[in-house]
Image (cartoon, rainbow, N blue to C red):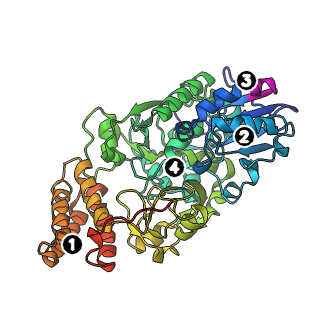
Amino acid sequence: MSAAPGATPMQPMQEPGVTPAPELTPPPGLRLLFVPTDSAARSVGADELADVLAAPAEAAGLTLVRNGSWGLLWLEPLVEVMSAEQVRYAFGPLTQADVPGLLEAGMLTDPAGVVHPLALGRTELLPELRAQQRVTFSRVGVIGPLSPEHYQAHGGLVGLRRALTMSPAEVVEEVTASGLRGRGGAGFPAGIKWRTVLEAPGEVKYIACNADEGDSGTFADRMLMEGDPFSTLEGMTIAGYATGATQGFVYIRSEYPDAIASMTSAIEIARARGWLGPQVLGTPVAFDVEVRVGAGAYICGEETSMLSSLEGRRGEVRAKPPLPALEGLFGRPTVVNNLLTLATVPAILADGAAAYAELGVGRSRGTQVFQLAGNVARGGIVETAFGITLGELVQTWGGGTASGRPIGGVQVGGPLGAYLTPEKFELPMDYEAFAAAGAMVGHGGIVVFDDTIDWAAQARFAMEFCAAESCGKCTPCRIGSTRGVEVIDKITAGIDREANLQLLDELCELMTDGSLCAMGGLTPMPVRSAVDQWLRTGEDAGNRQPQEVAR
């Protein structure tokens, strides 16, 4: 059992069956070939590339490592070769047809000297990586995801070991002082939630990791589970020790089979190493983790619906209070955090709260893993401190649209987030700044559209999405979204236009104020922002056909 609040810190004993971590740098002369195992890279041929390169790599004395993706998805599959000097050189995006030419150019024997259009130079010097501030994703792309040796060699378990020398209350205070807020979308301070669970009465408590990630244009949870699964387990274990919980659950959407397999394997490895189980790292602290797979319901990204699903019941929103921190899973005090939140905790404990709090702006401290998707030239992830502008992310990092046309707008924060046009691109990525602008940062997803965007169709889609994904428990969400689709159809058809626009506005107000959760309460945000653009760009904008996209 974990220590009670204010108890004496645990004294680590020798880890049963744990071999010493290797040096941070491989032995001299060791050369590695990295081919990503991330599902995005696999979808464009990474597995086939690994098969083609296996024999030549062995002949050249290279060891094949399947690493996570760096998140530069427009360059996938991105293959790296580590030279004898322990420098990694990147090549991409590769196809099987590119391999013979690259082998002839010396990719495996002299990666530094290769002259080829797909030779990108030293990985660490790629401008898209060098300018990032990676904390949560510090190991993703660097290590073999399921290698405990790689994990420890690159800072793994440092945070947990430090936490176990502190009292639970001290760990909670460290997380609070860091300014870490929930990365799932709500942005609630993690430390306050942890303190509530720590101080809640009861011997049985839980940690619930929300990895449902149903928002459009988001994939950071998936990439982290596939690229560095141990970081989430370490963060959950720290949370368990800090709050008195001995059991954790990772709730993963069924559409993520590779992430499910990765997390399941990581748990088995962690148990075998003594990182999980009745004596974590050889201490009296007990904590274990299990994977639970959702059935694909968007509403289960909402914390109380997820808890209902974890209990084996219909994924349906619960009224609050009581808060899950007091009466959560099976009626017990429960920490419910997004996966990115929990995976960031080890770095905070390892480097100290002050180092994390130095990043960011205002009350938005630390970093966010922003995800660029949609009609964007360079899609992928960008981890950087809060405060970067929306325009920098979309134009500088994303490179504008993939179609080459002007940007028409972006949706930030998933299907319930507002649509923002280039006039708002100076907006800093900051929870409070976005809230003041009638928008939300959410899970950090940014979906880009060019100027052929049909605003009326986007407004309709928001209502249609809500109608399809509502749990059905409250009337404003269940019926309001259905009526919303009908009203928008009448507006686009020119039926009693002004009266129906007024009706739509009243309907949005009712859904915002009367819905039990964010599903119905936030649906008006994209609807109103899209309707504003639709009306601003002309009455016929909703009926125009998208122009031919020039690629």
Q: Position of residue 506 (x, y in %)?
A: 18, 71
> Is the C-beta separation of discs 4 and 2 under 8 Å?
no
The mark found on residue 55 in the picture is 3
Circle nearer the viewer, 2 or 1: 2
Mark 3 or mark 2: whose residue is earlier in sequence: 3
Local crowd size for mark 4, using a 10 Å CA cut-off: few (<14), some (14–19), many (≥20) = many
Please say if the residues under marks 4 and 1 sit with CB atoms less than 8 Å apart.
no
The answer to whether residue 158 is visible is yes
Q: Amino acid at mark 1?
A: Asp
Q: Is residue 201 left or right of residue 494?
A: right
For the record, the magenta segment spans: 56-63
Which residue is found at the position 43% from the left and 72% from the top?
421
Q: Residue at x 59, y 65 (%)?
A: 360
Amino acid at dot 4:
Thr
Nearer the observer, disc 4 or disc 1? 1
Cα–Cα gap, marks 3 and 2: 16 Å
Specify the amino acid type for callout 3.
Ala
- Upstream in the sequence, badge 3 or badge 4? 3
Residue 204 is a magenta residue: no
Give the quarter of the image for residue 357: bottom right
Q: Which residue is mark 2?
A: 80
- Calculate the distance from the C-alpha at mark 3 to the C-alpha at mark 4: 41 Å
